[in-house]
Amino acid sequence: MKIALLGYGKMGKVIERIALERGHEIVLKKDEFNTYDGLSTADVAIDFSVPSAAVDNISASFNANVPVVSGTTGWLEHYDEMIALCNEKKGGFISSSNFSLGVNIFFGLNEYLAKIMNQFDSYKVTMEEIHHIHKLDAPSGTAISLAQGVIQNSDYSNWTLDEAKKGEIHIEAKRIGEVPGTHTVNYDSAIDSIEIKHTAHNREGFALGAVIAAEWLAGKQGIFTMKDVLNLQ
């Protein structure tokens, strides 16, 4: 399979290594200094860039009739535009805040726990996410996805980085050293606490999941999620 890498930072380089190990070919390594030359020859594009570049990268892919796997976060105010363009071009698209196989299992566990805990109003949910100091957005896209998973399965209606009001989930976002990503969901009461936690040890899990998603998406049309890729529906 021919892959275009849109974003060639630390994640892009790990994705490149894993893709090559799995027998794929890299036809474009797009960074801020080069063009989209070679994009149209790709079977699929993988976007791990920065928020300011993501929309251009995704648009260029759809316009070149190349399906896109995007792991960039912080650009979702333009998500509906990209969905419309994907549908217009009859493209294929997977956008996820986190491609790690473990995190996507964690998402499912979080939603299941939220359904259970919604029966017990003595517990209050809070979240914490820790990432490296280079991460540009806060809270992380993964933390937002976790919050949305709770909101969709409970009486909570919103999340906030500030002090939580009734119906809001407080997310504490920390930037420490070179931490790849740690996410914790807490349910606290006066009597006890319940906690679920995912800790990434390195970037390998994110990169492998993105390549697996690209392998699955190649040749398909439509809007998909990692639940489709991993058959977690």
Image (cartoon, rainbow, N blue to C red):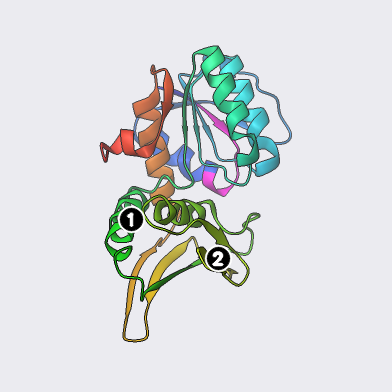
Q: Is residue 172 rendered to the left or right of residue 190?
A: right
Q: Which mark is residue 28?
A: none
- Asked if the magenta segment contains residue 48, the reply would be no
Q: Is residue 151 positioned above or below 129 on the image?
A: above
Q: Is residue 38 positioned above or below 123 on the image?
A: above
Residue under the image location 46 percent in, 56 percent down:
147
Range shown magenta: 4-11
- Asked if the magenta segment contains residue 9, the reply would be yes
Q: Is residue 42 visible?
A: yes
- Kindly state the secondary structure of the residue where label 1 is placed: helix
x and y percentages locating residue 85 in the rendered image = 59, 20
Nearer to us in this view, 167 or 211: 167
Q: Which mark is residue 106?
A: 1
Residue neighbourhood size for the residue with mark 2, other residues' Cα within 10 Å, grouped as few (<14), some (14–19), many (≥20): few
Nearer to us in this view, 149 or 198: 149
The residue where tag 2 is placed is 178
